[in-house]
Image (spheres, helix red, strand yellow):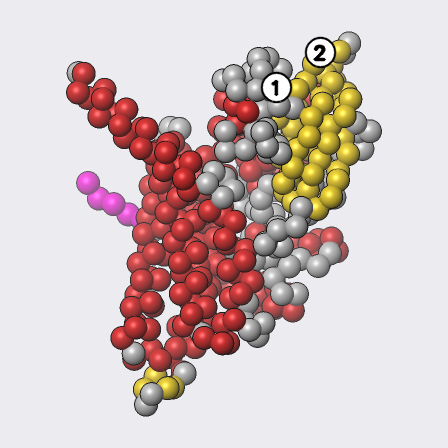
Amino acid sequence: MAVDLAPEPAVAELVTRTAQFVRDVVVPVEVANDGVVPSESVRRELQAAAKAAGVFAPHVSPEYGGHGLDMCARAAVFEEAGYSLLGPVALNIAAPDEGNMHMLEAIATEDQKARYLAPLAAGDVRSCFAMTEPAPGAGSDPDALATRAERVPGGWRIDGRKWFITGADGAAFAICMARTAGEPGDRGGATMFLVDADNPGMKVGRHVPTLDESLFGGHLEVDFDGCVVPDEAVIGEVDQGYRYAQVRLGPARMTHCMRWLGIARRSQDIAVAHAAQRELFGARLADLGMAQQMIADNEIDVAAARGLILRACWELDQGRSAGLEVSMAKTFTAEAVWRVVDRSLQLCGSLGVSGDLLLGRFLREVRPFRIYDGPSETHRWSIARRVVGRHTAAARA
């Protein structure tokens, strides 16, 4: 069976244009601002430039101004966008908006799409996904969900506290996961609700101080206190929130991997350029064995991560849950990206530690990826359970 990993010509052309746009337009803004989007106006300027370059919103359908790429096609484009920390913001494929768009396009009603998806896909507004809670609430274990939604005349009242809600500062709306049946620890019984930012029952609190700073809108605490929403705010069916969330979860984990793989490549490029011209001990750094090993290991990690991402994306494009493939790709990529950035910084020595390069910023940004979207330990637990379950089923057959 022939295996062709090359993207289709139209996708390949979009990859090339994205790469050029990121290098020519986005990277200078990133370098000038230490890898952080400094303001809403800069976000809008970058997105306007991406629209003019024809690379904006590659993931949404043409109906909403995008290119309608499937997961495998997104992999190459998102990787090029991720070559800069600001690239995903410019293309409107940054978390959490990208995952929210994907889910809304798949399961929202036509009225919900018109009200929430269309402006989000256009970059006119931003959003957040309010799932994670302070301990002992929902985190790695979604069944611990404590935020509750109760029936009231004409709708629902949501009460609970969320934290580490990415992008909540300035978001026009939140997608809130709340328990509508059962108790914390019970399987299922969750529902997703659309909550407008001007709802008096939703209060955005403090920014949680974190290592990373490049995800626009920060990571915040959000309180739902007597937050009343109409029945029309329900996404999908009541009590089926976790099932619908899977539409978002697997693809969102893979798009995170794609974007961070771009930063790994950027780090490698910086390190190789430095090693090729830096002379010490009578030779170029790139000619020394230990440096060559780090450069080679970086290439191996990037190539292996890309292969795992593509396999998981292929499974998703076939309409499968791809739980095992997604967990393997997410775990390996999160750790490989860290290794690549860390080695690259090491290769650059004191220059890598300094603020004259962005490698220190990259290192801070990629470290949390081993925790969010499921810690590596949780994914390994899931992988092992699936493998043992498969073995047990085969033994009984």
Quarter of the picture holding the N terminus:
top left
Q: What amino acid is labelled 2 in the image?
A: Arg
Q: Is 101 located above or below residue 390 in the figure? A: below
Q: Where is residue 219 in the image (x, y as percent from the top left)?
A: 65, 45
Magenta stretch in the rendered image: 1-5
x, y (%) of residue 161?
Answer: 69, 30
Measured as percent of width and height from the top left, residue 356 is found at 57, 74
Is residue 304 among the parts visible in the rendering?
A: yes
| Picture quadrant where residue 103 is located | top right
Tag 2, which secondary structure? strand
Residue at 34% over, 84% down: 284
- Between 164 and 302, the one lying in front of the other is 164
| Label 1: element kind | strand
- Taking the image as shown, residue 24 lies to the left or right of residue 297, namely right
Look at mark 2 in the image and give the residue it sits on: 151
Residue at point 49%, 48% (across, down) = 369
Query: Quick check: can you spot residue 125?
Result: no
Is disc 1 surrounded by few (<14), some (14 to 19) or many (20+) residues within 10 Å?
many
Q: Residues within 10 Å of mark 2 (few under 14, many from 20)?
A: some
- Give the residue drawn at x 40%, y 28%: 321
Which disc is residue 340 wearing? none
The residue identified by callout 1 is 179
Residue 396 position in % (x across, y down): 18, 16
Q: Nearer the viewer, residue 3 or 159?
A: 159
For badge 1, the amino acid type reads Arg
